[in-house]
Image (cartoon, grey):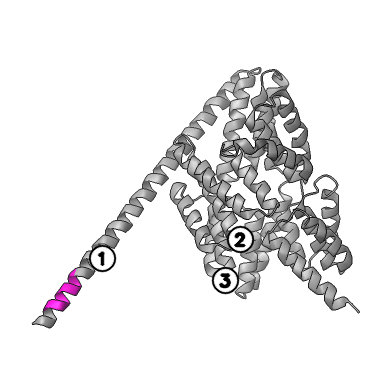
Amino acid sequence: MQRRVVIGAALTVLVLAGAAVGASRAAERSARERAAARVDAERQAREADIAFYRERVARDPIGAADRTQLAALHLQRARETGNYQDVLRAEELARQSLALRTGHNAKSYSLLAAALLAQHRFADALEIGRALHHWDPQATSFHAQLAEIELELGNYDAAQAAFDSLWPRRRELAVAPRLARWAEIQGRTQLARRLLDEALTEALARTELPREQLAWYYWRAGDLALRTGRLDEARFAFDQGLEVFPGDYRLLVALAKLEAAQGHWHRAIDYGEQAIATVADPATLGLLSDAHATLGDADHAAQYARAMELSVTAQPGQWHRAWSLFLLDHDRRVPEVLAKVQDELQTRRDVYGYDLLAWALHKGGRDAEAWEAMARALSQGTRDPQLLDHAREIARSLSHSAP
C-alpha cells in the first residue's frame, strides 16, 4: 500500500512537471508566433511604404525628399534580407536626390555613404563622411559614421582621434557598436563586451526600433562571444535574437558557425541552408562546402564551392574576403588571391587585409615576408582567433624551415 502511495505521488509530480513544461513550451510558441506576426506586420508596412514612395517618385521628376525616403526604405530592406539589389537601388536614389538638391540634404549624403559601406566601397564613402562631419561637426551620427569608415580603411590614427572624441557619447546607439568594434581591433575585448551589453540594453528599451535592428544587437553581442570562446553566451544571444526576429539570416549564419566550431556538422548544415534560403552569402556557402567535405560528401562540397564562386562574381566591386580565405585555406589560386589582396591594400590597409596578405604569402611558401605582413596585422593588438591562428601557423612554418 505504501509503495502504491509513493508511486502515485511520483506520478503526480511527473504529471505536474509535464504540465509545467508543456505550459512553458506553449508560452514560448505563443511568444514566437507574436514576434513573427509583428515582423510580418513591419514587412508589410515597409512594402506598402516602398510602393507609395515609388509611385510618388515616378510622378514627380524633381522630388528630392521622396527619393531620399525611398532610398532609406531600400536600405532597411537590404539589412533585413541581404538583397544586394536593394543596396544598389538605395545608392542610385540617394545620388538622384543629391543631383536635385545638395543644400539641406545631409540625409541623402548619409544614406549614400551607408550604401557605399554596404558594398565595401570604403574609399568612396570616406570623402562623403568627411564632408558630412565638416558641415555639421556636432552631429553624433555623422561623426560616428566617419569613425567607422576610417576604421574599415585602416586609418587607425584618424579612427583613434574620432573615437576618443566620441567617448562621452558612448552610450548612444549610433556610437556604442562602432566604438565596440574599435575596442575589438585594439584587443580590448572586455570593453567591447561591456559596450555591446549596454547598447543591447538601450536597444531593448527603444520600442520604436524595427525588429531587425533589435535582432542585430543580439547578433553583434553573440558574434563577439563566439569569437572569444564564450559559446553558451553566444548561443543564448543568437536564440534570443531569433525570438525577436524569426528567420533572421544573420543569426542563422551565426548559429551555423557556432555549430561548426563545436564539430556539429549536420546542425551547421541545417542552419546554413536555412540562411542561404534568404541570401546566398559567400561565407555561408563556404562553410557549407567545408561541412560537407568534413562529412565525406565531396559532391555537395564541390557544389557549394561552385555556388560560392558564382555568388562572389555576381557582386561587382571589391574581391570578397571570405572567398579569398576559402581559396587560400584550400590551397587554390594562391597567386591570383595574392595579387587581389595586394591591390586592395593600396586603398584599404586594415589589420584583416594584412592578415590576408600574410596568409597568401605563407601559402605561396614565402614565410619570411608573411611574418612581416603578420606583424602589421597584429600591430593594433587585435585578439581575433583567425589572426592568432594564422600567426601561429606562420611562426611554426618559419621554425621548421630554420637551418
Residue count near mark 3 (Cα–Cα under 10 Å), binned few <14, some 14–19, many ≥20 = few
The residue beneath circle 2 is 228
Mostly what secondary structure, the magenta segment? helix
Picture layout, residue 157 above or below residue 71: below
Q: The disc labelled 3 sits on which kind of residue?
A: Gly
Please tell me whether mark 3 sits on a helix, a strand or a loop: loop
- Horizontal side of residue 291 vs 270, given as left or right: right
- Horizontal side of residue 57 vs 204, given as left or right: right
Q: Earlier in the sequence, mark 1 or mark 3?
A: 1
Residue pictured at 65% horizontal, 48% vertical: 181
Contact check, label 1 and label 3, Cβ < 8 Å: no
Q: Nearer the viewer, residue 385 or 307?
A: 385
Residue 10 located within the stretch drawn in magenta: yes
**Viewer-side label of 1, 2:** 2
Residue count near mark 2 (Cα–Cα under 10 Å), binned few <14, some 14–19, many ≥20 = some
Outermost residue, right side: 403
Q: Nearer the viewer, residue 216 or 312?
A: 216
The residue beneath circle 1 is 18
Please tell me whether mark 2 sits on a helix, a strand or a loop: loop
Outermost residue, left side: 1
Q: Earlier in the sequence, mark 2 or mark 3?
A: 2
How far apart, in angstroms, are the residues tagged by discs 2 and 3? 17 Å
Query: Where's residue 298, x and y in %?
Result: 65, 72
Check residue 263 in the rendering and tell me which mark sits there, or answer none. Answer: 3
**Could you tell me which quadrant the N terminus lies in?**
bottom left
How far apart, in angstroms, are the residues tagged by discs 1 and 3? 32 Å
The segment highlighted magenta reads 5-12
Quarter where residue 316 is shown: top right
Residue 311 located within the stretch drawn in magenta: no
